[in-house]
Image (cartoon, rainbow, N blue to C red):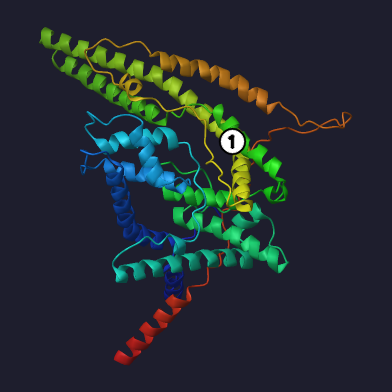
Amino acid sequence: MLERDDRQLSATQTLDQALVDADHLAILNAIWTAETASARDQRYAALLAEALPQGYRLEPGHRVKWLWRTLRAAELAGLDTRLVLADAIAVRDLTGACDIPAVIDARIRRSTAALVPQPAGPWSARVPEITDPERKAFITKIAAMMDSRKERIGQHAAEHAAPWAVSTLGRVPDDPAARLEWQQRASAIGAWRELSGYDHPADPIGPEPATGTPDLRAAWHEALTATGAADGPDVRGMPDGMLAHLRDTYPIETAWAPQHVGDELRHVRAGARDAHLAAIRARAEAASHCGQPGQAERQQALAASYQAMHDAYRQRETVFAAVMADRAAWEQATRQQRHLAIAADAELRRRHPTQPHPPLRSTEPQPANQPQRDELILSVGNDIPQIGQWIKDLAAQHRAFAEKLAERQNLTMLTENHDREDPGLAFPAWKNADRDAILQPPKPQIQPSVQMLERATGRDLDMEAAE
């Protein structure tokens, strides 16, 4: 019962699966990205050259890609790229900058890193300006195929009551208008699942992607906007004042987030492992030079230095691991409230598209700067420095966070009925979906694209004619 089903598909099943996956969003998105990224980067380069002061010119380099990525994230958050570049250049003079794109990128990220992307809309509306008509026609066709696939995902979820859609959106409505809206929301969620490869049967979207992938993060937020617990509050029926209040809770919820020290934790763990192995090698070398006292003493001293490095790295690892555990607890405790604030922001933008709504901004603590990261680089033969003040502050914040989390988890709902015995928790924890059985029946496949079926039929006819 616990073994995996290793049966191979028949030739017909393999052909059907190939037709279904021929216009898979992950495949089409790879083509879309390859064809549109260069045109978008050329537009960013032209805007940067226009914004640079007299006497400066754009030097090609690998770091310029970081600037294009940051500009893309700002653009997806609803900002004007031209104004973003102008503001970053006007902050301070660029005299003495060794790498102008890297300097501008750092300035923009300081002000836009916490912005939440807005729904990007259909791919057909995002076709960039390309001078080559044949290439533009090809990209337009790819965009139409992606939009069609996204629509079919929603239809398939409604026809077969996909578990990830039903657990999130509730059962499929019988009313045609409500069913259409249900399908559109399921399309956004299903499109994110195909783009990212996330295939949990019950959890609809999973964790938020990193900021290093702006387009994928925007697709996740569009899926998040479409979600909403089936038995939870519906922001579409709330008045504008309540939506504005919920939107304003986003910076409050993110303000008490522990600092993200994942990179620092990975660095000290790798340093501790390398120092431990080096100490073992040095002790082995000392044992092999037992007849050479001077050489053996040097190896013993080297082993002691590596061991001291190992202990220092482990000491720092303890602090960083505790902070990252707090970070996971914070994400679990505030997930529902943060998602609700993002949904309220999206609903306000939908109701009042002409009003200038500011981008939703996180108030999470900034990551460690370069001088702080340099403190984590230890070298053999040198004195081990004391733990930096910023790490001591993290340890103190860890204790304060535990008290804050316990206080929050004990808060109860306010109610006018004081005789009620159990009003319930004010901030209930996010409940994970129950796991299904290990063995599942075959899942129904999405209807293949009409164009793919026509091309497959035409190919078969040509093969028969040739024979």
Screen quadrant of the N terminus: bottom right
Q: Name the residue: 53% across, 46% down.
A: 206
**Residue 90 position within the rendered picture, expressed as x and y whole percent measured from the top left:** 35, 34
**Residue 44 position within the rendered picture, expressed as x and y whole percent measured from the top left:** 32, 49
Q: What amino acid is labelled 1 in the image? A: Tyr
Mark 1 residue element: helix
Judging by the rendered image, the residue that carries numbered circle 1 is 250
Instruction: Examine the image and state in which quarter residue 277 appears.
Output: top left
Crowding at mark 1 (Cα within 10 Å: few <14, some 14-19, many 20+) = many
Q: Please name whichever residue, 163 or 247, is drawn nearer the observer in this view of the structure.
A: 247
Q: Please name whichever residue, 292 or 22, is drawn nearer the observer in this view of the structure.
A: 22
Instruction: Examine the image and state in which quarter residue 137 appears.
Output: bottom left
Screen quadrant of the C terminus: bottom left
Q: Name the residue: 53% across, 28% down.
A: 257
**Residue 155 position within the rendered picture, expressed as x and y whole percent measured from the top left:** 59, 67
Q: Please name whichever residue, 353 or 455, is drawn nearer the observer in this view of the structure.
A: 353
In the image, is 92 to the left or to the right of 240?
left
Q: Please name whichever residue, 334 or 177, is drawn nearer the observer in this view of the structure.
A: 177
Q: Is residue 112 above or below residue 348?
A: above
**Residue 16 position within the rendered picture, expressed as x and y whole percent measured from the top left:** 46, 73
In the image, is 225 to the left or to the right of 423?
left
Is residue 432 among the parts visible in the rendering?
Answer: no
Of all residues shown, which one is farthest toward the right? 419
Q: Is residue 268 above or below residue 156?
A: above
Is residue 318 among the parts visible in the rendering?
Answer: yes
